[in-house]
Amino acid sequence: MVAESVLATREPSRSEAVSQEVQAILAATELGTLIEALLHRGYAVVGPTVRDGAIVYDQIESLQDLPAGWTDEQAPGHYRLKRRDDDALFGYVVGPQSWKKYLHPAEVRLWSAERKNSTFRILNNEEKVRAPQAFLGVRACELAAIAVQDRVLLEDKYRDPIYGSRRTGAFLIAVECTQSAPTCFCRSMGTGPAVADRADHLVDLVLTELQGSRGHRFLVRAGSDRGAEVLHEVKTTPATDADRKEAEAGVEKAGSQQVRGIDNSDVKELLYRNFEHPRWDNVAARCLTCANCTMVCPTCFCTTVEDVSDVSGVHAERWRRWDSCFTQTYSYIHGGSVRTSVKSRYRQWMTHKLAAWIDQFGSSGCVGCGRCITWCPVGIDITEEVRAMREGASHGNP
Amino acid sequence: METLERIIADHPFFAELESYYTGLLTGCAANVRFQPGQYIFKEGEEANEFYLIRSGKVALELFAPQHKPIVVETLQDGDILGWSWLLPPYLWKFHAHAVQDTRAISLDGKCLRTKCEQNHDLGYEVLKRFAQIMERRLEATRLQLLDVYAVK
Amino acid sequence: MATAVTYDPMLPHPYLVQSVSKETPDTFTLKLAPEPGANGGSFRPGQFSMLWVFGVGELPISISGNPAEHDQLVYTVRSVGQATNALVSQRVGAGVGVRGPFGTGWPVDAARGRDVIVVAGGIGLAPLRPVVYEVLKHRGDYGRLVVLYGARSPHDLLYRKELASWAKQKDTQVLVTVDYGGLSWRGHVGVVTTLFKYARLKPAQSVAMVCGPEIMMRFVARDLLSHGLSRNDIYLSMERNMKCAVGFCGHCQYGPHFICKDGPVFTYEQMRPLLEKYEL
């Protein structure tokens, strides 16, 4: 079929074996050199920084931009920054933003056109060449979310060139979690907190922050050839068993701190067969359809298009913006929307995320980052909703 | 040429009815023919017979003030026309208007309903069959009411 | 100068309006052709395009023309709002943006050697017309053709002349009905499901293709089942909100299916568990 010929070729996968056994120690201050090395190679480095009472992602120039000594206190419907009693650079969990801010931008122009007599012409819409980006501070759950969006936007029937151009060449530096928030549940989703070695070389460098008696440093390993190359430009010392054990213990601690989880053994069938479960009415009474969850979720990908033209009507543009299945017009066809009730919209989101996604893309759409729980103004907890449905309970939150 | 008995016995509506009864019906059956434009029966008249349409087309019409007759449904080959003969007050609820040259078999409803009163087993069999027709008509009518093609 | 058509599914290509003809008071058929020098494309019956009116908006519209005609795209559009109204108001020679074709098509290949039952309600006849063209073009490849078509009233009937000419074809039965007959209608009155008993069907060897309002398709599918067709031989064309048509915007999801790329044509077997779910 004609349309399928559009499928652009994917990046060839790296088949060279990369030794992932080699681990080194990077002093905390050397991280600044790593950032410089990336900048020097032409990358725009994006990482965490404190702004507006949260840890958000933005371009960073140096170590000074990182949220040293800050942590986040999270609970359903609650997020506060708190000072740590140390100088950890990555001593927080996850903020309201995810890397989809850069890979799947909230607002992007698809093309512009101008009138030409009675017809029109699409204007040369070549995107200005953008610098490749290096993402510093990718959590295990976020790595999993990038893989989930890769599957949706690059590996299905069509390929999204906007995601593709931003994703190609993106340098990923993962930082393993050594603490979890009460809202985290990556362990039950099988996506963290450890950053697993991957055959697809999804990640370029993996860091684990250590602050033991040997000083403030990072255990670092390369996950790809180019990661190894960049590592050669900074000063490292060999890692010892003690270093490795400290890192493992930190990650293990993060895992054991998690109090929430989803039992994934039959969640797809559970949701499919409970379309009329009374629990949906219960959650509908609380949900404000504010769409926060879809905005903070690192895998939500829905967008809408908007056609605009200027006053003279000569120039037109099509823009793409994030959209949410929680809006009233999301399911609108002539005559009205299909999902008008709050219940039907919440049910759509949760069923898609945990069940339909599996049929569509072969894995769950949820990576257990817990953002939807933290950023829901009324603290709706997706893990509790699943449990309530399974147990048949229909009472509300305590 | 088919005999009336054969036609009646073969019709799905009468299937599995004891031959005694189909014989009885045949005894009171007759071939009838209606010209285009002819009214077979009118609303309010006594309903004593029903019809098995063999060919042609009949429109069921209702009258309302300030309106010409409204066709609510049309019936054709193989359809049974009329059930008001079966239930009190035994009066037609609508007009039946032959739209084309229509051939049918008329059946003695009055005779049949008397037999139903005397023989409740027969009555049950007949009512069961009519209930099926009414259910299908009701479903179709409801769908018609929904006006699914209208722009909302 | 010939320009190769680059099939980036996100970019609309200008097609020029050849004609706009009125089918009913609110429904028009547009014929579009590629700009001089540009190549046309092909489509499969059941597929749709995204049609863009400069500065107004874009809509998914089923292609309702003849798949054998490669240099023309035909659409029958009902004017129900701002965008559709803008589309049907285009003048001859105006450029309309076309993306596509998208979607799965009707099973015209799988139906070879079998009887084809086409059941259409209202504007639903538009995406089914290419099936009739295909069957009539390769008449020997198919068994009987039965076309059952219902509309709201006589002046809402589409393609009346064609319906009459199809009825004259070999081994072809065309039955038409309306919900409301009006004063001078001498034809059948009743919903399209009431036509089944007059259709000469051989269920075991039939493939049915159904398109119309969702309620109508539900009732029709049930009736076809009770006439002995199997769930995998009944096909429906579903509709939901669409923005991108390429499976990225998420709007057209219906259960686990993306109507734009997994559909719009589905078997009744696939749709059955979803059709009865309210507000899915």
Image: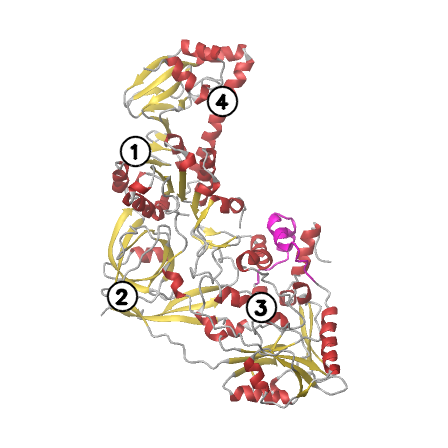
Q: Secondary structure at mark 2?
A: strand
Query: Relative to the observer, which residue lies in front, A141 or A324?
Result: A141
Residue C72 point in image, percent of width and height? 26, 56
Q: Which chain's residue wears label 1? A: C
Q: Which mark is residue A145?
A: 3
Residue C115 point in image, percent of width and height? 37, 38
Picture quadrant of residue A183? bottom right
Please give the name of the residue rendered at 40% of the width and 38% of the height, measured from the top-left corner: C206
* Residues at marks 2 and 3, CA–CA distance in whole angstroms: 42 Å
* Residues at marks 4 and 3, CA–CA distance in whole angstroms: 61 Å
- Foreground label between 1 and 3: 3
- Foreground label between 4 and 2: 4
Q: Which residue position is annotated with label 4? A: B129
Q: Secondary structure at mark 1?
A: loop
Callout 2 environment at 10 Å: few (<14), some (14 to 19), or many (20+)?
A: some
- Foreground label between 4 and 1: 4
Q: Which mark is residue A119?
A: 2
- Determine whether label 2 and label 3 are within 8 Å by CB: no
Asked if residue A384 lies left or right of residue A288, the reply is: right
